Every structure is written in C-alpha cells, then in structure tokens.
Image (cartoon, rainbow, N blue to C red):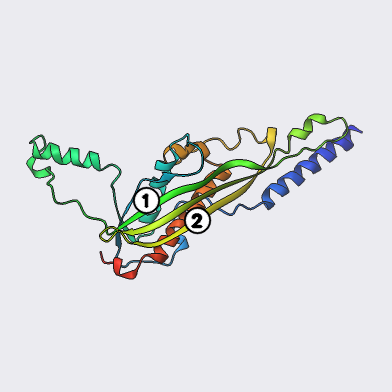
Amino acid sequence: MRRLTFLILCFSLLMLVGIARAIEPTAKVDTGLEGQLPPYTGAKASAAVAKFEWKAGYDYRHGEPSGLRDMLSTVLVQSKRYRVLERQEFGAIKDEIGLSEEGYTEKQTAKKRGKVKGADLLIVAAITGWDPGTSGTSGGLGIGNWKGFGGVLGGVKKSTMAMDIRIIDTETSEVLAATRVEGEATDFNLGGFGGGVIGTVGLAGGLSTYSKTPMEKAIRVCIYEAVKYIIENTPREYFKY
C-alpha cells in the first residue's frame, strides 16, 4: 500500500510539473528590444519621458511610477531610435552647472549654460490598471490520508498592468498619438513546495518587489508594447538627429 501511495505521489508531482510548463505567460522577461525590432542605424528622434501619473485606483506602495518611467526610458534607448533626454533629475544638472559658474570646478571641465539639448517629443504615461496577482484559482490534491498534500498545488495566478500613452509635440503641445497598452502574465504556483525557489533579483527602482513573478512579466510586456507603439506612431519627420 505504501509503495502504491508513493508511486501515485510521484506521478502526481510529474503531472504538476507538466501543468506548470504548459501554462505560458503572455510576456517574456528579456534584456532588450533590439531582437524584436528590425535593425536600425538611421537618424534618431529627440524625446523626454515625463513623470508617470498613477491612476490605478489606490495608492502605490513601492515607487512604481518612477521605476516604470526608468524602464520606459531604458527601452527607448535600447531601440536605437531615440535620443532620450533626462528631465526628472534636471535639478542635479543645474546644480552641476552652478558649481562651474561659481568657480568650484576646474576650467577645463566646467559646464556652461545653453548646452542642454531640447526635446521635440514628450512621452506622457498614466498607469490605469495594476493587479500584481490577486486573481486566479487555487486547489489541492488529496491522496488517501495525505491531507497535507493539498497545499502542494498553490494555484494559477494572473497579473495585469495597463497604461495610457501619449506622444506630444513640445513646441505646439499637439497630441500626435495616444493609446492604451496592457500587459498580462499567468504563472503556476506550487504552494508549499514552491516557496523560496524564485528568490529576489534586482529590478528597476521600487519594482524589485515584483522580481521573478508574473507581475514582472506583465510589466515588461506592457513597457515593450508601449515602446513599439511609440516607434510606430512617431512621424518620420521627427527622426532627424
């Protein structure tokens, strides 16, 4: 009887592993956008990314807006199609110029006013949906007197994110394009057997709390889809640098 129970247990675990592999997320965690876009060596557009607005319906807890803005800026640079200009840390740039003007820096390395490049485009984003994985189904598996085995199957969790994107001409304030992009990922949780296996890996800003989870996958696919939209909807005449 014990041998039969052991064999059933092993078979059940194999089935669980098979289910986990079969559930494919809609997002893939990767390091860049270059492989997903045609090769590009042409002129670049000049853009700045504004502070992300949070409209998800409740207060954020981990600095998500700034982390998302940093990720979008990074992927825009990775696309090799944009000259991304820093604006969120402009106070530090002004301080550096001020040090030069007040004579605190070496003459050969001193910075001057009037050298900061202007942006032709402003990318504005608002986070309108944010669900790290509260939705999903869970269940267990009981074999004879193995009541505790019900915790092995933790459940299937779905994480989602949505944001509105606008591309704005900084000279005319005209909205050139606007859309809503969404990211979604589903993952399989092995409950008690899976705890601690994923661990934590650094992710931009306060988003590190979602590292190696379905939410990270949802975030990345949403950011990448946003960048693809920006590329496809930036008028050709803006690519001139």
Q: Which residue is mark 2?
A: 181
- What is the secondary structure assignment of the residue under circle 1? helix
Instruction: Tell me the amino acid under the disc marked 2.
Output: Val
Write the residue at 55% across / 53% down.
27
SS category of the residue bearing label 2: strand
10 Å crowding of disc 1: few (<14), some (14-19), many (20+): many
Amino acid at dot 1 = Ser
Question: What residue lies at 44% left-to-right and 64% top-to-bottom?
Answer: 37
Q: Earlier in the sequence, mark 1 or mark 2?
A: 1
Q: CA distance from mark 1 to mark 2?
A: 16 Å
- Kindly identify the residue that appears in the image at 15 percent across and 41 percent down: 97
Q: Residue 229 or 21: which is nearer the viewer?
A: 229
Q: Position of residue 162 (x, y in %)?
A: 51, 50
Q: Residue at x 30, y 43 (%)?
A: 88
Quarter of the image with the N terminus in it: top right
Side (left or right) of 152 relative to 35: right
Which of the labelled discs sits on residue 49, or is there none? none
- Displayed quadrant of residue 67: top left
Q: Quadrant of the C terminus?
A: bottom left
Query: Looking at this rendering, what residue extends furthest in the bottom direction?
Result: 236
Mark 1, residue position:
73
- With respect to residue 208, does 116 lie above or below? below
Relative image position of residue 100 (x, y in whole percent): 11, 39
